[in-house]
Amino acid sequence: MAEQTSSSIVIDSSPAAIMNVIADFPAYPEWAKGVQVAEVNEMGIDGRAEEVFFSLDVPPIKDEYTLAYDWDGDREVTWWLVQGKMLKSLDGVYSLRDLGNGSTEVTYRLALDVHIPLIGMLKRKGEKILIDAALKGLKKRVESL
């Protein structure tokens, strides 16, 4: 990933339980801010999605796009843009680190680019908004299950 934004949060749950929520794409509209639709296009042999279509509306980003996923057990998942309308690229990673006390540190790294010209500072701000909303939503969802 080139220029990227990163943030972390501690969630009171196991890496496996957190990764199960991350992998449950049809439920994203219930907890992931701005996600209107998340439909799995292709499943992997491990039972986790390899390609997912999204409809997103989080100002200033409104787009329909498809992401490809690569899973490393309950340790990490990476994704990249297959196609989008407004988005030119969208690369991300969730890294999970078991803290050994029933909680897990989740780090989210994201780099995005759009077809309309934006200065770097605005891109980083957009990434930060998306990351913070995603981490807070993920924490709330996992800890409520």
Image: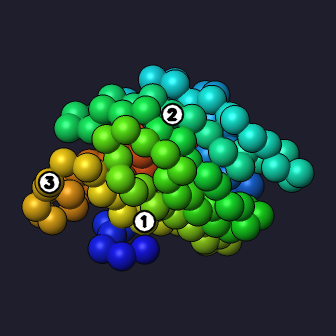
Give the mark nearer the N terminus: 1 vs 2.
Answer: 2
Foreground: disc 3 or disc 2: 3
Residue at image x 73%, y 67%?
A: 72
Give the mark nearer the N terminus: 3 vs 2.
Answer: 2
Q: CA distance from mark 1 to mark 2?
A: 19 Å
Residue at image x 43%, y 50%?
A: 135
Amino acid type indicated by mark 3: Pro
Q: CA distance from mark 1 to mark 3?
A: 22 Å
**Disc 3 and disc 2 in contact, CB within 8 angstroms:** no
Q: Which residue is mark 1?
A: 109
Could you tell whether 91 is left or right of 88 in the image?
right
**Label 2: element kind:** strand
Give the mark nearer the N terminus: 1 vs 3.
Answer: 1
Foreground: disc 1 or disc 2: 2
Position of 18 relative to 74 (above/below)? above
Badge 2: residue crowd in 10 Å (few <14, some 14–19, many ≥20): many
Name, please, the residue furthest toward the right. Answer: 45
Please provide percent x and percent y for residue 2: 36, 76
**Label 1: element kind:** strand
Amino acid type indicated by mark 1: Arg
Please provide percent x and percent y for residue 85: 37, 38
Where residue 117 is drawn, which disc sits there? 3
Amino acid type indicated by mark 2: Phe
**Label 3: element kind:** loop
Residue at image x 57%, y 35%?
A: 53
Foreground: disc 1 or disc 3: 3
Q: Which residue is mark 2?
A: 54
Count the marks: 3
Residue at image x 72%, y 45%?
A: 49
Could you tell whether 32 is left or right of 67 in the image?
left
